[in-house]
Image (spheres, rainbow, N blue to C red):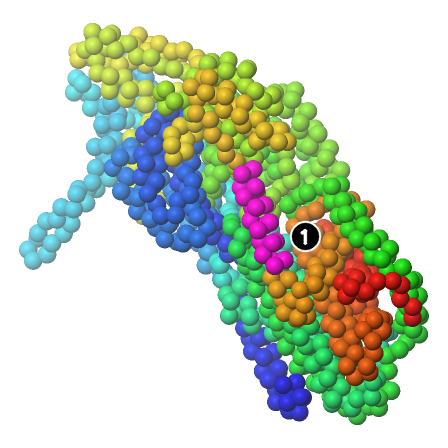
Amino acid sequence: MVKFLLSRPIAVGMTFLALLIFSIILFRTLPISLLPPIDVPQIVIKVNYPNSSPESIEQNVLSPIREGMVTLNGLQDLESKAGSEVGDVRLTFDFQTRMELAYIEVNEKIDRLTNNLPQDMPRPQVVRINSNDIPIVRLQVIPKEGVDFAEVSLLTENVIKKRLEQLEGVALVDINGRQEKVITVTPNKPLMSGLGLREADLIRAINDGNSELPGISVEDGQFRYFLRLASKLETAEDVGNLPVHGPSGNIVTLSKVATVEHALSKPTGFHLFQDKEGLVVTVHKQTSAKMNETMPLIYEAVELFKVDYPQVDFELTQDQSSLLNAGINNLQTSLLFGGLFAFAILFVFMGNYRTPIIIGISLPSSLVISFMVFYFFDISINVISLSGLALGLGMLIDNAIIVLDNINRKREEGLPLFEACVSGVNEVQSALISSVLTTLAVFVPLVFLSGVAGALFYDQAVSVAAILCVSLLVAFILLPLLYFLLFKNKEKSAAKEDSRLFKGLLKGYKKVFQGLFAHPGWSLMFLFLLIPLLLGTVKFLKVEGLPPIEKFDVLISLDWNEPIDASQNKDRIQSLLAQLEGNFTVAESDLGLRQFILYEGENAIQQADLYLMFADDEAKESVSRQLKRFFRQNYPQASLAINDAPNAFDQLFNSNRPYYEVRLKNLESKRPIKASQMNQWMEQFPVETWTKGPGLQEGSSVIFKTDLEKLALYGLEVNQLITSIEQLFGNYLITDIRQIGEIIPIQLRNDQLDFQTLLKSNYIYGEEGIAYSLNEFITYSYDSHYKYVTSDRYGIYQSLNLDVSEPTKHEADIRSWGTERDLAVDFAGQYFQDQETIKQLMGILMISILLLYFILAAQFESFLQPLIVVFTLPLGVGGAFLVLWLTGTSLNVMSAIGLVVMLGIMVNDAILKIDTINRLRAIYQTKDGMETRVALTMALYHAGEIRLKPIVMTSITTILALIPVVFSAGLGADLQRPLVFSVIGGLTIGTFTALYFVPLAYWFLSGQRGAIKF
């Protein structure tokens, strides 16, 4: 096949040129994003029910929703959490579930449940979680001093949002921090009392004045007209001019007995940028959009906003495209330094410039053609797929060096150029195919991992398979063709390969080789003893998810654990920022309830998230210490968590589930256990280190008790009392003024006094108009209550989180403790998911090793020789562990990827060396008629000489290409440094292994004994 193709150079050249052009065209259509579009199998149902307690939301809202959702297809887990005024139900599905269908099914069930839910509650929001839900950037919208905040809210909602949504590549624009304009009516109660008017008279007058005719039409001759009441309200002045009828028939203008004005609605949350109140707009890209093209459009639009709306300040923060740019820059760096060092090493070792030029043409060609595979497999260009390409680049260089070196060697043996190209490729063809298949045997099974990890590995596996398969195509066809064309008119001396450097290296190799084979048994035993010693260094390595990245920003998650409102929350955060002023560069806060459509985290008025950016790490550490000291001294009851600000990777991988959770259920009442009782029981809990879960966290509350007998005695209805309390303490909605594109609520607002004073100064009226003070029928008391009610598909539970190293060993004691108190005990948390993932990984690892063994057994036609390759792997892994330990680097995702890169190159070298030994051994025995021992000795010796150059060139080229990352700074370098240390450590030991361990192990498995003399 190679011979036929080399004889048609124009046809082959045109074919590759067509592939390159076609791949470039397809590359321009590929979406570019930070992460692959992963459907996380979760749906969150969010509930907002103002002025409702956690118990009320659980009983009236969440419980019916849970009962209606249990029959969903593919539902794996169901949990809910009810808080003050808010609640959510989290649905987790099997990863094979089609989430677009599940989302439709959940919405249909919510629609069916509407009649069973409170009528005055807004429809629950259904949020589907996707990796594209992570915003690519946040736009800060800050009104300048003196500018109406409500007008800026309308500007953001109606103009800014729509202009951003019109940009190419933008899918959704979400807003937090909006404040609505309302019309407030504040009664003058002493004046109203003197005129005999009540609040009910004001409410009736406003409702009558805002009436609409229900689609009535009149005829006038041959024409028909629809009627419209001219008295419909439009402004606060219209409301103030309404007539109010008193019980004695007197009429008074509403503005004379009440203050009517425009105001902002009572906020349940705020957004602050620096210390100023504003709005934040999050921008989400379309799945098929290119992030590197969308971001410049957003920056350009913001510059236009600054010109068009000078009354508002705009600023972009938390740009996530930096991670993608880091990945692209890393690939460019790998290509640049890989190409330069490959050129230099090939020039030094082979003594001509034509061979490096061939490498320089083949590397980018392979990369570009790989993007055609991306297109047909629907893979986007993202950090994960780019890492797969970076993984394949090492083997791409390796394959190219092996083929070119073999062709050069054939020319040195005296073959004509054409025959040297054909024979050189054919000789290593089967070995290179086996090496690619063994690498794929490691990657492809990882696709079957469950969860997000399996979905991410799909992109990486496809990209690795693409570049490796293309590299074979290039190595077998394009490389020999280019070699043939470049050396066609050159003498044989042009391909001379033995430089002085290589001759010195070869001399040293022979000395070590002869020394080891003088005592082969002891030498092999020494190498086998190195395996446990090197692998043992893993015990000293810290295990992490992602490598520690130098970050100058933190996210402070704060719960005041006090019954404060959103305004008090804002005042405290602003006071805190004032104390820290000058120590940070950017401050961004989301306080209270979030208005984001896609927000699926915890929502509570007393909570706050504070993002701080610092100039350097020293300022970051100093402020973190200052904050901990401040809260310890001033707010000891507050819960404070200071962590590095999460990037898109963290948001995707980090679980919001506790690590190990003990769930307790009351078997008697199916209700939460009283706090006083639970606190007594927890004193005897068998584990000392634990923290309360949401269902056990307590908060203060005021309890109103109504005197029903007294109400009945005075002839009063309970509903009258409830309506009076709603008007007094709630944001009582009278009616709405509905205009095109705007709805303005009219609210009844009372004096902002303490509730005891309000109960004394407000009245309820009997049948004869007799006024009774509200405090005559209401008694109040202070009490503590649970802040949250947590439930799963089996009912209400209360939980606590264990903070111990081996949580499972306490299970029996905890179950016994629960049985004594008639409690059902269950265990949940991320721990069990991690254990399941580890089991799957072990199973996949065994499958990968079996596949690797099967492929090698087929390649070598031997059951023993594949074991040589298998035993080279622990030496390389141990070398990587050793370097990671010496450099103080953790074992993380990036260092694990480095291990795979290094093992791919090691396996490649070991396979080629064994294949060369087998081939030479057969030649010496059959053609030259040597004895078995002599043929084996000569094959081991000469195979080492033949394979020395490609093995050393590959290792040196790969290591030198990666070394610049060690001395670089920035996000990309922080991510790639563990990978670099893994590859350098593994290849340093791996090169020695391929050169000496493989022949020693081959000698041992062949059944030979005794020293070998050369």
- Total marks shown come to 1
Prevailing secondary structure of the magenta residues: helix
Which residue is denoted by mark 1 in the rendering? 896
Which contiguous range is marked in magenta?
A: 830-850
Quadrant placement of the N terminus:
bottom right
Residue drawn where x is 25% and y is 31% of the image:
206
Could you tell me residue 805's position as x and y percent?
64, 31
Q: From this viewpoint, is residue 43 visible?
A: no
Of the pair 541 and 41, the residue shown nearer to us: 541
Image-based side of 697 in relation to 241, left or right: right
Q: Quick check: 204 left or right of 272?
A: left
Left or right relative to 558: residue 871: right
Q: Nearer the viewer, residue 54 or 590?
A: 54
**Residue at the left extreme of this rendering:** 221
Quadrant location of the C terminus in the rendered image: bottom right
Looking at the picture, tell me which residue is in the foreground, 27 or 621: 27
Q: Amino acid at mark 1?
A: Ala
Tell me, yes or no, whether the highlighted magenta stretch contains residue 842: yes
From the top left corner, tell me how far across and down residue 82 is, in percent.
41, 30
